[in-house]
């Protein structure tokens, strides 16, 4: 009798091979990160684009600790009870950016649903500290949804970074499975609200390979554009550990190219679409 083995993940294709980081700028930043024990998502998240981004003077920093109050099925960040807020963190991040001589900084964070302000005060103070210490550095803030509470989102608006990003991550049908405590429409409303409040450039990202259809991706891109989002990033989901959601499919470069073409036709200012694209990929371009 033939044995049938189910749920075998697809083999990783050749187009997902990562180039080794090289170049003088990368080497310099790598040395500074190690010497001063600086915390970047680039290193802790083993981002495939680290060499390219660092070579262009861009890096991503995570604030508000490394324990998240949410338990998204795709994310490798630890879930649990976060530590107390470090009120010196804004100055520490600003100092790291100065030491590394970063031209364009991306700031992100865990979700802090345990805090009344959702962490938005630290967010605002971090942007202000970076501005004081690094007046020539441009900024992108990749924010959580702050549970859709406007007074918390308003603190980001008041800080006024060049780009404000919030990721929908996946299509409507898969949101409950992929982003367990998040809501698809709430994310769209946050993005729409940011634009209405005067943020110059808004941005969102989608991961593919979780079981979505092409039509669902087209609809998600259309929903984002209808929320007046300016920039969209589209990349391949990769499973962080065996405990996380499995990869259902590896999307071909040709399919990513179709999504890019569709996004340009929709009117996005920038569309980054490819297997190794991540939220911060080519982030320095998105202020233009």
Image: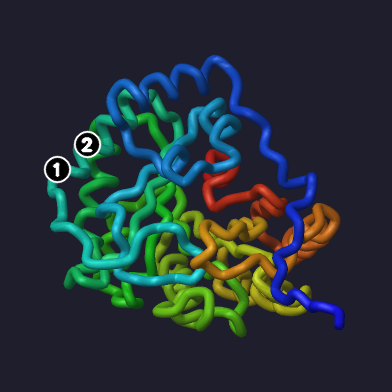
Q: Is residue 249 visible?
A: yes
Q: Position of residue 261 (x, y in %)?
A: 80, 59
Q: Alpha-carbon distance for marks 2 and 1?
A: 6 Å
| Label 1 sits on residue | 88
Numbered circle sitting on residue 57 = none
What residue do we see at 46% from left, 81% from top?
Answer: 183
Q: Quadrant of the N terminus?
A: bottom right
Residue positioned 70% across, 74% down in the render: 7
Q: Residue 32 placed where, x, y %?
A: 36, 21
Quick check: 288 left or right of 211?
left
Say few, some or many: other residues with alpha carbon within 10 Å of mark 2 (under 14 / 14 to 19 / 20 or more).
some
Circle 1 — which element? loop
Quadrant of res 157: bottom left
> As drawn, is 235 to the left or to the right of 58?
right
Q: Is residue 203 left or right of residue 100?
A: right
Q: Which residue is more in the foreground, 174 or 3? A: 3
Q: Are marks 2 and 1 in contact (CB under 8 Å)?
A: yes
Q: Quadrant of the C terminus?
A: top right
In the displayed structure, 22 sits above or below 272; it is: above
The spot of residue 121 in percent (x, y) is 20, 58
Q: Is residue 232 visible?
A: no
What residue is shown at x 36% (from left), y 27% (from top)? 33
Viewer-closest of 185 and 256: 256
Residue 20, position in %: x, y?
Answer: 63, 29
Residue with the mark numbered 2:
92
């Amino acid at each position: 009798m033939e044995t049938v083995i189910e749920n075998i993940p697809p083999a990783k294709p050749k187009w997902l091979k990562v180039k080794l980081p090289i170049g003088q700028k990368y080497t310099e930043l790598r040395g500074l990160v190690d010497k001063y024990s600086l915390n970047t998502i680039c290193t802790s998240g083993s981002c495939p684009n680290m060499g390219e981004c660092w070579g262009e003077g861009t890096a991503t920093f995570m604030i508000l600790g490394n324990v998240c109050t949410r338990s998204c099925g795709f994310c490798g960040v630890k879930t649990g009870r976060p530590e107390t807020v470090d009120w010196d963190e804004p100055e520490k991040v600003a100092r790291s950016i100065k030491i590394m001589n970063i031209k364009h900084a991306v700031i992100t964070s865990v979700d802090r649903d345990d805090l009344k302000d959702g962490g938005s005060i630290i967010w605002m103070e971090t942007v202000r500290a970076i501005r004081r210490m690094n007046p020539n550095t441009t900024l992108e803030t990749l924010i959580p949804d702050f549970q859709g509470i406007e007074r918390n989102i308003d603190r980001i608006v008041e800080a006024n970074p060049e780009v404000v990003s919030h990721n929908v991550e996946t299509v409507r049908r898969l949101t409950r499975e992929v982003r367990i405590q998040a809501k698809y429409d709430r994310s769209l409303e946050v993005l729409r609200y940011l634009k209405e409040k005067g943020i110059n450039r808004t941005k969102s990202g989608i991961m593919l390979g979780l079981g979505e259809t092409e039509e669902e991706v087209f609809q998600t891109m259309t929903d984002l554009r209808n929320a007046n989002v300016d920039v969209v990033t589209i990349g391949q989901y990769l499973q962080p550990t065996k405990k996380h959601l499995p990869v259902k499919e590896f999307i071909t470069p040709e399919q990513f190219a179709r999504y890019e073409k569709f996004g340009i036709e929709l009117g996005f200012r920038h569309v980054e679409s490819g297997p190794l694209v991540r939220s911060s990929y080519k982030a320095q371009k998105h202020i233009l």
